[in-house]
Structure formats: structure tokens, C-alpha cells
Image: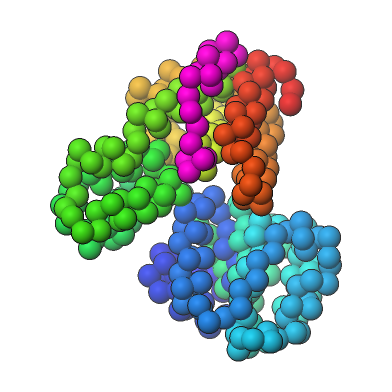
Amino acid sequence: MILKSYIVEQNVDVLKNYQATLIYGQNNGIKNDIKKKLKDKNENAEIIVFFEDEVLKNKDILYKNIINESLFNKEKIIFIQEASDKIYKEIFESLEKENKNIKIYIFSENLEKKSKLRNLFEKNLKLAIFPCYEDNERTLIAYVNKELKNLNGLSGEIVNLIISNSNMNRVLIQNELKKIKSFFLEKKINKTEILEILNIKSNSNFDEIRDSALNGEKKKINNLLSEIDLQNEDSFFYLNSLNYRVAKLKDIIKISKGNNVKYEDAIENVRPPIFWKDKPIVINQLKKWSLESLTQSAIKISETEMLMKKNSFLRYDVIIKDLIIKLTSRASSISF
């Protein structure tokens, strides 16, 4: 059964009507919101999280968790992260054993129309599926207004500032909203303090590092990395900034090839749009990267994120600096 993401965002309880739900697409911000709402709505349930690689290593792990009810909780929630058709068989076999006290939520990246997982969930009325498409300016304005509706002093200018400073990325916006809600809990929002909270100077500094890395400017990167102090609490902002730019470059190349047009023309059709001041930088980066090398780099960024999430004791700044150096080398035609 195909659902609309905005309907689920408005009322996550609609998912209770289904044995399992498949949530796919590029918008990790929507996925994060859905996960949080599910956890909040099911705070008394036992929550189990599996990643695809865990399922591949232990083929029976899903099935065993479905036939075995929770010892301490009446209900059980199973989250499966980063799923793909590689674990279709394990998911299919698990769904054959229905348990009304257990709900399964599967999160995937983009799934092609021919995906076996996608077809399974689209055609079965007991299963739900919905895509999480990228946000546009209109959806993000509505999102920020809704999240900050209980705070005083919110203006259209501040909303636009939050969105533009986050590169129209909902994950980055979510991080900023947490800081804003905490800081202005008992006082009126004002632009001066918002500028400090958004850490725009630091973000701009990292933008320069990101762009220099993707341009392959090794000497400049060495100087920049020696001068900047990467903050642990902003580590996932840095990764998202890199990932967002790599994804944007891939989109432009696909548009260029698909329509047989130059990069300069393709860049005008990409959505969300690229700011005018960034266009010359993006054009230069496009000349250094192929679609295949960008895909490999996106995988490298994703692997870095997983490493950090699974090992909180590591020095995130060292890991990110290492990633930046590798991206710079790749842009200079030196493989990872």
C-alpha cells in the first residue's frame, strides 16, 4: 500500500494499521522525524535496531526476533537501517510470520521501480510504503515554522536564514532547531543571537574546506586544516555538507547527460537551486569529477558516518580531516 510522506508526518499512527512499513528515498531528515515520532509514540515498547550488514551476517536474526515476543514489554518495534534487495529473502520470510504485537520499520535509500523490496510493499495491502523526496523551499519554510511555532519573535527573515545556512538540508536544519529551541526556550528570538547560534562563520569556513577539497587544491587544504578547529558537536554537519555537495554534483552530471547539454545549462535545472555565488565553484568541481568517482566518494562519506556512529569514543575531527585529505587526493586524480 503506497502512502504519502506528508500524511505520515502529520499522523504517524496511520502506520499502526500495517504489519510493516518501508520508508525509502534521499531525504534523511524526514526519515529522522518519522523515527523520532515512532519512538515517542511507542515509548513502552521494546525497540530493536538492525543494520543490513547484521542481517546478512546472521540470516535468522529477523525471524527469531519476530517469533520470540519481548520478555518485558507487550509490544516490540524493529527498525532495519540501510536495507536493500540484498536482504529481500530475510525480510520476506520474516513477514510470513505475522505477530500483531510486533511492527517492523525498514529504512532504505533510493529504490528503483524494479526493486523487489519496493514491489513487495507496494502490492501487499498489509504492508505500507512511502518515498521521502527532497525538500523544496516551500516545504522547509512550513517545517521550520511548525517546529518553532511556540517561540516568540520568529520572522520570515529568520526562517529563511535558518534554511539558507543549512543548504536546504533538513538534517542540518534539525540540528540547528535543537539549539534554537534550547536557547530561546524562555526568551524572544532575535537575529543577533540567531547568527551566533547558527555559527555561520564556522560553517562558511568549512564550506571553503569542502570546496577546496572537491577542487583538489592540496596545498590550500593543508593550510586550511592546520588553521581550523573542527568541533566534535558539528561533525555530522561537516559530513552532511560534503555529502550534499557530492549529491548535487551527481545530479548535475545526470541532467547534463540525460539532456545532452553543457554543465552550465544543466546547473540551471537542478533542484533545489544552487546559489549564484556558488555556481563558478560548482562548474570547476564538475570538471574534475566523473559520475563514477562521485558515487565512490559518496560511499566513502557514508562509511565514515557509520564508523563515527558506531564508535563514539573516536576523535571525529581526525576522521573528518582524513576524509577531506582523501577527497582532495581523489580530485587530484589520486585514488583512495
Left or right of 42? Residue 157 is left
Looking at this view, name the residue that lies furthest to the front: 313
Residue 302 in magenta stretch: no
Compared to residue 141, the image places residue 120 above or below, namely below
Point out the image quarter for the C terminus: top right
Instruction: Determine the image quadrant of residue 330.
Output: top right
> From this viewpoint, is residue 207 visible?
yes
Left or right: where does residue 251 sit relative to residue 81? left
145 versus 100 height, above or below? above
Q: Position of residue 143 (x, y in %)?
A: 33, 56
Asked if residue 122 can be seen in this view, the reply is no
Quadrant hosting residue 79: bottom right
Its colouring scheme is rainbow
Relative to residue 90, is residue 312 drawn left or right? Answer: left
The residue sitting at 72% across, 62% down in the picture is: 116
- Give the percent coordinates (x, y) of residue 214: 56, 23
Q: Where 161 falls versus 101 (above or below)?
A: above
| Picture residue at 83% right of the left edge, 72% below the top | 60
Q: Residue at x 79, y 78 (%)?
A: 64
Name of the residue lying farthest toward the top: 219
Picture coordinates of residue 31, whole percent (x, y): 51, 59
Q: Position of residue 137 (x, y in %)?
A: 33, 46
Q: Quadrant of the N terminus?
A: bottom right
Q: Which residues are magenta?
A: 217-235
The residue drawn where x is 67% and y is 25% is 326
Between residue 276 and residue 267, name the one nearer to us.
276
Query: In this figure, what is the number of numbered marks?
Result: 0
Q: Is residue 54 above or below residue 252?
A: below
Look at the magenta stretch and give its main secondary structure: helix
